[in-house]
Image (tube, grey):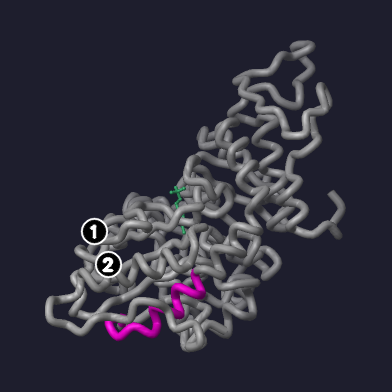
Amino acid sequence: MSESVQLETIAATAGVGTDPAFRSVAPPLHLSANYAWNDPLDKPQYDYARSGNPTRSQLEEALCALEGAAKGVVVSSGMAAVDLVLNLVNPGELVIAPHDCYGGTHRLLTARGKRGQFDIEYVNQTDIEALRTAFTRKPKLVLIETPSNPLLRITDIAAVVELAKECGAITVADNTFLSPALQRPLELGCDIVIHSTTKFLNGHSDVVGGAALAKDQKLGDDLAWWANCTGVTGAPFDSFMTLRGIRTLFPRIERQQKTAEDVVNALSENKRVVAVNYPGLKAHPGHEIAKRQQKGFGSMFSVEFDESVDVIEFLRKLQTFTIAESLGGFESLVCLPAEMTHAAMTPEARETAGISNRLVRFSIGLEHTDDLVRDIFSALEQAAAAGDEKVAFLPNKAASKCA
Ligand code: PLP
């Protein structure tokens, strides 16, 4: 597809009209595990589905076009994508990672670090001085996760890339929270972008998948080699479903983001709310960086309620929101990171990262704003200690705080 084609068009048409056999509009799903050779010395384009298959290739091409990558590989989960890039690091070399990254990423880095597969240093990546100090150790690879899960902290991607380039480190950005619809880390100088495609890219909470996409062909070839070697490549059916999900990525995100802004504004007005972590708020410490490097603020946010709110009871009382892991789907979800997504981190690591036991993370879906706000306020009212004043029931839209 030509470079001038807009990302929305790439997403909407990914794989469409590519069937040479019957000219089916929706692409066929190739489930075959193996492909026949014409001759023992004539290796076909596809021979074995772990190494490559046409359905996965279509998804890889779509993801590369959306992220501006030269070569990418679709893998079986977001964690497989994180692990895949760690193959680029040798024992004795250093990986720098955010101290407040997704709990599963923290668990993997810590476990592999303990086994001596590389050295690991966790850094508060919003602190440029802390980053500078860490870079004096000359890392081989730096992992960025921005906005971070679950605190929605913003890392200045270009600033990290500048430090990484000075010492020849590979920069990897986890773009799961925004997707290429709202942020394109390779454009900002990163070498690799990774995704849990489980989230916004598939968007329908029915596939677990991942991807690692490289700006440069050689790095992409290395990733594809390791993915085939270790057997973490994605399944054809999952690729088919994810490609299908991507076609509606842009309208989904646009709508989810608008609703998230309305819900955030309503919550920010509430006296029981101590903090709302959403980069779209002008008071968010990363707001200006987010404005610069993102095309929107997304539909994820987290909230700290005051002591009057029994947080567990709040979660139990929610009806429209589902208590569940994951994010970025059509359905609104809520989770308690300390007990769920970040339970694998030690309490000390969570404390260092700033993830309290009372932090609640929200992923906004496609429901109507009023229903979501009503649900939150109703649960909040029920969870608040008896005798407390009633909380406001409906949002004050005029008091909007998002930029
Ligand atoms: N990266 C981020 C930012 C995530 O939030 C997650 C999962 O929540 C992952 C990676 C891991 O993805 P998966 O669950 O598809 O393995």
x, y (%) of residue 263? 45, 73
Q: Residues within 10 Å of mark 1 (few under 14, many from 20)?
A: some
Q: Is residue 17 left or right of residue 212?
A: right
Which residue is label 1 attached to?
316
Specify start and end residues of the magenta stretch as a single range: 260-273
For the residue labelled by badge 2, is the local secondary structure a helix, a strand or a loop? Answer: helix
Q: Residue at x 51, y 52 (%)?
A: 330
Q: Tag count in the figure?
A: 2
Q: Which residue is mark 2?
A: 379
Can you see residue 12?
A: yes
Name the quadrant containing residue 215.
Answer: bottom right
- Image quarter (top left, top right, bottom left or bottom right) of the C terminus: bottom right
Is label 1 in a helix, a strand or a loop? helix
Q: Looking at the image, is 37 positioned above or below residue 349? A: above
Give the alpha-carbon distance from disc 2 to disc 1, as whole Å.
Answer: 8 Å
Picture layout, residue 142 above or below residue 107: below
Q: Which residue is depicted at the point 17% across and 82% down? A: 388
Q: Nearer the viewer, residue 278 or 396?
A: 396
Closer to us: mark 2 or mark 1?
Answer: 2
